[in-house]
Amino acid sequence: MRRFLPHPLLTLTLIILWLLLVNQLSAGHLVLGALLGWLIPFATSGFWPEAIRIRHPLTLLHYLVIFLYDIVRGSFHVAYLILLGPARLRPAFVQVPVALKTELAISLLANTISLTPGTVSVLLSEDKRTLIVHTLDTDDAEAVVADIKQRYEAPLKKIFEEGVE
Amino acid sequence: MIDILLSFLILTGAIFTFIGSLGLARLRDFYSRLHGPTKATTLGVGCLLIASAVYFSVRDEGISLHEVLVTLFLFITAPVSAHLLGKAALHLKVKSLAATPEQENDTPPSPGQVFRPTVHD
């Protein structure tokens, strides 16, 4: 099973992507999508040393809801700051210690940080332990770190890494 | 009714995209300018795409979900490009209003960590 279908999740994602790309649902495209979904992970399995396992699908769903809500909130916040005038902004670099181990979880965390209110991740230290985050307007760096850790990192850890080590 | 919804979405999208671009002109250092395109513009383009999905689903029979893909790819790529721009900027010591990590850091940087001093305005 594992040899012939190394990444079931990736296969499923690719089938859905294919159906969205052709923008129609038909048996022929389903078969073509399934073929591509099988062939692509198979041919590129060298790039995917570990299969992705989602341990808590419900937490993932909850995370996505928070994520989408925060994108909207972040957009309003940044728009407000831009309109208010840049003179009163207090930008800062904040170091966020990262407790995540898997690369997928870290990159998801960095992506989330960049899309949510007032923060953009700019640098991951080479030991993958610290994420440098630029905040647009803050006077309390520790609150920013605590917010990121509690709001995004904790669920990501639960989803991708519970039971690892 | 649909028309009102569509015009509302398109207007909101246009306004947010405009504010994002305005940020590029108004904000005062490179790192702050990264914020406009990653957030305000994302929501702006998101609104336009929802409008597009609704319009084409109503006009033709069958639903149009192309736009979900565009949104998805945008959400994946926008933070990555911002991250790379920021990383390159730190490396090139671009002028910053905020203290860069090296100056702010009390503990010595971990081995292999590259922080360059930054010239302040």
Image (cartoon, helix red, strand yellow):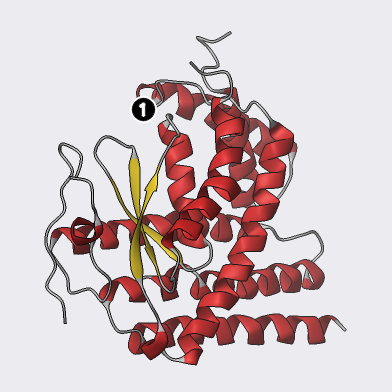
Query: Could you tell me which residue is drawn at 64 percent across and 50 percent down?
Result: A20
Does A33 sit above or below residue B33? Answer: above
Label 1: chain letter: A
Q: How far across and down, in percent of the image, does residue A9 sit?
A: 60, 28
Q: Position of residue A140 (x, y in %)?
A: 45, 65
Toward which corner of the image does residue B105 lie, by quadrant? bottom left
Q: Nearer the viewer, residue B117 or A26?
A: B117
Residue A71 appears left or right of B4: left
In this view of the protein, can residue B63 be seen by the observer?
A: yes
Q: Please, which residue is most extreme toward the right here? A: B1
Taking depth in this image into account, of B98 and B52 the one nearest to the observer is B98
Q: Residue at x 43, y 43 (%)?
A: A107
Could you tell me residue B82's position as x and y percent? 35, 62
Q: Classify A131 as above or below A52.
A: below
Q: Residue at x 79, y 81 (%)?
A: B5
The quarter of the image holding the N terminus of chain A is: top right
**Which residue is the extreme one toward the front?**
B106
Is disc 1 surrounded by few (<14), some (14 to 19) or many (20+) residues within 10 Å? few
Tell me the residue that label 1 is attached to. A47
Classify residue A113 as left or right of residue A129: right
B96 lies above or below A24: below
- Residue B18 relative to residue B113: left or right: right
Q: Secondary structure at mark 1?
A: helix
Residue occupying the point 80% across, 59% down? B62
For badge 1, the amino acid type reads Phe
Asked if residue B63 is positioned above or below residue B31 in the image, the reply reads above
**Residue B98 falls in which quadrant of the image?**
bottom left
